[in-house]
Image (cartoon, rainbow, N blue to C red):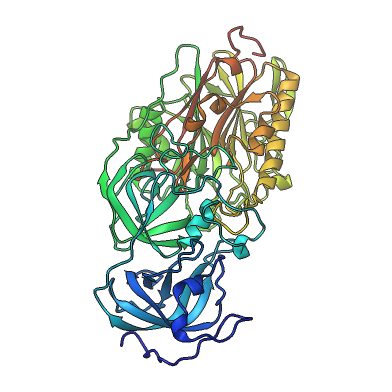
Amino acid sequence: MRAGAAVAAAAALAAPAGTAAADTADVRIHDVQGTTRTSPYADRQVSGVPGVVTAVAASGPVRGFWFQDTEGDGDPRTSEALFAYTGDTAPDVSPGDEVAVTGTVDEYSPAEGAQTVTQISRAEWEVLGSGAEPPAAVPLGPGTLPEAYAPEGEDIGGLELDPEAYALDFWESSEHMVVEVADARVVGPTDSYGALWVTTEPEQNPTPRGGTAYSSYDDPNGGRLKVEPLAPDEVPEADVGDGLAGTTRGPLYYSAYGGYLVKAAEVGEHVDGGLERTRAREPEDGQLSVASYNVENLSAGADQEVFDRLAEGIVDNLAAPAVVGLEEVQDDSGPDDDGTVTPEATLKRLTDAVSAAGGPDYRWRQIDPEDGADGGQPGGNIRNVFLFDPERVSFTDREGGDAATPVEVVDGAGGPELSVSPGRIAPADQAWQDSRKPLVGEFEFEGRRVFVVANHFSSKGGDQPLHGLTQPPRRTTEEQRHAQAELVRSFTDELHAADPGADVVVMGDLNDFWFSDTLATLTGGGLRNPMEELPAEERYNYVFDGNSQSLDHVLVGGASAGTAEYEIVRINSEFYDQVSDHDPQVLRFTPGGAAGSGGS
């Protein structure tokens, strides 16, 4: 007898509502799991449920063990495994133990909108034997998953599972069962928690570098599968495109952080795919190079290695652009919520590191936000910043730009110009509540005026997950980004109304996809998105939950639009040793275009 009270052989079983009381011996795991996502025994006591232990979670915040019925009922809708949750107690069982488990059937919800995990809580058990043959693993290979992702519904929890029709139903019908994937390809790099993502469907929207491209709301790529270690350091440090040769095996679990995953008791051997970081081409004579780079909550308190690696990326991989728009530059005290809003120490450390790496002697322009008004990490006061090389481009300073003053398009001697430079677009508008305001700057390159808008639109953090109970998921955060896009579009429309040839660059972390309504709004006028001219499988600069997707963009408009050359510089998102979670982008163009039209 182990872990608590002995199991009473004659303990009463509370049957589901509408059914007669059943004998304890008659209730098996598939009865508890049922044919929907919610157990018919939810919130009821069950006794003596038999199975063989397949894996043990002996440490971490979730402790317990998985056990599986070796017989089964032959119904593909019903899982034959459960998780016995033991709280903060490490269970004294081993794989191969035959157990009879008693406890309360619980539908544990890891987060609002997520699917639930069927488990037995307050578990007690009796070990009836040891050394049992483990159940055969469910093989996961090409063609295993249905092409359709999920049934539609506001709450699919009560729908009958159809594992032959929907990928999410297949995963749910295998909940807690031992699954295995052979020779898996990594599609999401190892994270700071020691987890990575593989694909069970290697032909599902592959990228040229080994990832899985997210190119449509209609295709979330159901073959993505997270691999989390049962033992510390079990998962290797892997990049996208690496392999796990041999077998990766363990029980199928579910988390709010990514959905279905393998709690890996066995991990395939790491095979280095040789992924290399890319370098942008240097601009030709007459080309202006601009870049956008989300530097992920950079503050003066960061280690010197962070500044050195960012500098190396800017100098060597981005080819030291004349203008760099930065997002997520924090104030000098970082997340300390002490009223500090200035980033001077942060920017000095970065520009000094660039100079030390052999890059330009960058200058910067930015506007301090009001304390706590622009969202992001509490206390951090993130903002957009311009770096520029004064040897190649000049910044046109016009006084009056501050956190509250809106920038306007005004008539100047040589065409449209900014009322303040740098300035912020409509900072008092509700669209920017708790969000970063766009930073607008007026530059001059070889006698040509160029307007640059650096953006960091509101987060997607409130959207429902791809793997959640509502299908398709509601993208509730879009409304704010749509309003933000309308304001930026209105501003660039004003510039182009005053001068259709005005050179305008709109760049930054727009927190939305190239196929989204947010980008359609921005490009509905005089701006174009050169990312759309890349093959669909290359339109990404961020990897999230194993999906290679696009959050960052550089849009261009005016006489220069037809000359633009665009590159995504892949130095972060696909690598486990990343200095930021975003890849930067570079745009090279000839201001004024071939004819040199527009204002001076």
Q: Residue at x 61, y 44 (%)?
A: 436
Q: Would residue 343 be seen by someone viewing this image from the given angle?
A: yes
Answer with the quarter of the image where residue 486 lies: top right
Q: Is 88 or 259 nearer to us in this picture?
A: 259
Could you tell me which quadrant the N terminus lies in?
bottom left
User: Where residue 235 appears, x then y in whole percent?
Assistant: 30, 54
Question: With respect to residue 396, does 249 lie above or below?
Answer: below
Q: Would residue 256 be seen by someone viewing this image from the given angle?
A: no
Answer with the quarter of the image where residue 61 lies: bottom left
User: Where residue 258 appears, x then y in whole percent?
Assistant: 48, 55
User: Where residue 64 appears, x then y in whole percent?
Assistant: 38, 74
Q: Seen from this angle, which residue lies furthest top?
A: 595
Q: Is 486 or 41 nearer to us in this picture?
A: 41
Question: With respect to residue 270, does 119 lie above or below?
Answer: below
Question: With respect to residue 39, does 575 lie above or below?
Answer: above
Horizontal relation, residue 198 to residue 290: left or right: left
Q: Is 480 or 161 nearer to us in this picture?
A: 161
Q: Residue at x 31, y 77 (%)?
A: 98
Q: Residue at x 40, y 64 (%)?
A: 177
Q: Residue at x 41, y 26 (%)?
A: 320
Q: Is 253 or 455 nearer to us in this picture?
A: 253
Q: Seen from this angle, which residue lies furthest front?
A: 74
User: Where residue 451 appears, x then y in whole percent?
Assistant: 62, 25
Could you tell me which quadrant the C terminus lies in?
top right
- The number of callouts visible is 0
Answer with the quarter of the image where residue 521 lies: top right
